[in-house]
């Protein structure tokens, strides 16, 4: 069946494409150089190595993981539902339609300008000033306050 090959080529054990045998690997060279085939070749030799070196437990665990992965692939709805439910539990925010749409706009415009404008606007509103120098002082004070809180200290300013 391989009569169209010289002794220097062989059909890849995975994709069947003929490839040039590396003389240093010789008989053990069974896969071609395509990424997919290289991956399979590595997996096969790893498995072989593990069975030869008493890696049976690991091999069984890997099989179990594969089974779970396959099951997830076969049941995408269940998996999606479960993840969504968990995520909803973790972040239980009640957001109105209007706020959600504005937050989405802010996220879409994810730029320094938007964030900066929002911060300046908040501070201007809180302090009742539109003067940049006053706002700058306030930003510094609020940052120090925030750092202190995050470090578990009582803010001095
Ligand atoms: Zn191949």
Image: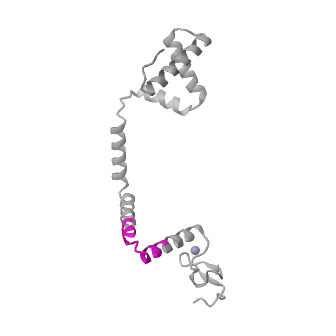
Q: Position of residue 31 (x, y in %)?
A: 57, 76
Image coordinates of residue 41 in percent, x first then y, are 53, 73
| Total marks in image | 0
Q: Quadrant of residue 15?
A: bottom right
Q: Quarter of the image containing the N terminus? A: bottom right
The residue drawn where x is 57% and y is 78% is: 12
Q: Is residue 123 above or below residue 85?
A: above
Residue 155: % across, % down: 45, 18
Q: In the image shown, does 79 or 151 lie closer to the viewer?
A: 151
**Chief secondary structure of the magenta portion:** helix
Q: Is residue 70 above or below residue 25?
A: above
Regarding ligand 1, which quadrant of the image does it lie in?
bottom right
| Relative height, residue 37 to residue 28 (above, below) | above
Query: Quick check: is 48 in the magenta stretch?
Result: yes
Residue shown at 59% from the left, 15% from the top: 136
- The picture quadrant where one finds residue 35 is bottom right
Residue range highlighted in magenta: 46-61
Question: Residue 55 occupies which quadrant of the picture?
Answer: bottom left
């Amino acid at each position: 069946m391989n009569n169209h090959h010289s002794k220097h080529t062989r059909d890849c054990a995975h994709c069947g494409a003929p490839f040039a045998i590396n003389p240093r690997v010789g008989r053990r060279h069974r896969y071609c150089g395509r990424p997919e085939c290289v991956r399979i070749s590595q997996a096969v030799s790893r498995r072989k190595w593990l069975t030869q070196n008493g890696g049976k437990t690991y091999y069984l665990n890997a099989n179990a993981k594969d089974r779970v992965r396959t099951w997830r692939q076969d049941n995408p709805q269940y998996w999606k539902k479960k993840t969504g439910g968990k995520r909803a539990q973790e972040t239980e925010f009640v957001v109105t339609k209007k706020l959600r749409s504005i937050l989405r706009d802010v996220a879409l415009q994810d730029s320094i300008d938007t964030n900066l404008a929002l911060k300046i606007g908040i501070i201007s509103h809180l302090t009742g000033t539109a003067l940049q120098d006053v706002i700058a002082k306030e930003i510094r004070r609020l940052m120090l306050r925030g750092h202190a809180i995050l470090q578990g200290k009582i803010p001095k300013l």
